[in-house]
Amino acid sequence: MFSWLAKLLLTSTAIAPVGFTYAWVAWFADEKTFAALAVSVSLFLVLLCIWLLRYAKNSLERIDFSVSTVEAADRENMGFLILYLLPLFTASFDTLNWEVWLPTLVIFAIITSTGYSYHFNPLLGVMRWHFYKVRLD
């Protein structure tokens, strides 16, 4: 099982697509420095996600168990996709309220990394990883 720090890091990697979206908006708003920073941070998060998955695959213990039912748990992702695309629908880059966005993202990361309520990370989907609800015998 992941530690709270590993869960927090993996949760933060889910924000990478948002960073790419903001970079796109910033680039066309002539905010080239911010666009480069957003792309850099997003690429770092993608690499962090890849590293965490490799670490988990090589280091976490494996347990044999008998499964009675399996159900996909990462199907309900439309709300998250809208969140990722939301910056594209702003009037201009200058109207983004960073005093609201930044604490919201931090709170989202803390809440989802310390509980069991988070089961959608677009990077994991791209890398063909999925979450499942599994019932044991």
Image (spheres, grey):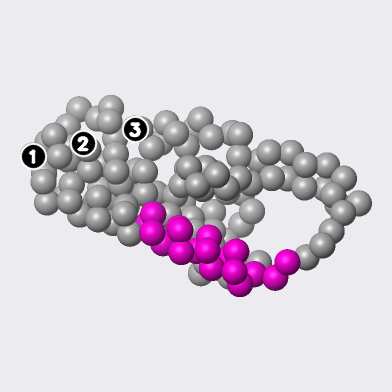
Q: Give the x, y percent position of residue 129.
A: 57, 47
Q: Are marks 3 and 1 in contact (CB under 8 Å)?
A: no
10 Å crowding of disc 1: few (<14), some (14-19), many (20+) = few
Residue 121 visible in the displayed image: no
Asked whether the beta carbons under mark 1 and mark 2 sit within 8 Å of each other, the answer is no
Three-letter code, disc 2: Val
Q: Within the magenta stretch, is there residue 65? A: no
- Span of residues in magenta: 45-62
Determine the CA span between mark 1 and mark 2. Answer: 9 Å
In the rendered image, residue 65, in percent from the top left (x then y), is placed at 84, 58
Classify 70 as above or below 12.
Answer: above
Q: Tell me if residue 3 comes above or below residue 35 in the rendering.
A: below
Contact, mark 2 vs mark 3 (Cβ under 8 Å): no
Q: Quadrant of the N terminus?
A: bottom right
State the residue position of label 3. 86
Q: Mark 1 — residue?
A: 30
Q: Mark 2 or 3 closer to N-term?
A: 2
Of the residues shown, which amino acid type is indicated by label 1? Asp
Q: Pointer 2: what residue?
A: 25
Along the line of sight, the residue nearer the viewer: 31 or 106: 31
Asked whether 85 or 63 is in front, the reply is: 63
Q: Is residue 52 magenta?
A: yes
- Determine the residue positioned at 33% across, 59% down: 44
Mark with earlier residue (3, 1)? 1
Q: Would residue 74 appear left or right of 86 to someone viewing this image?
A: right
Judging from the image, what secondary structure is the residue with disc 2 in? helix
Residue 48: image location, x then y, percent: 41, 62
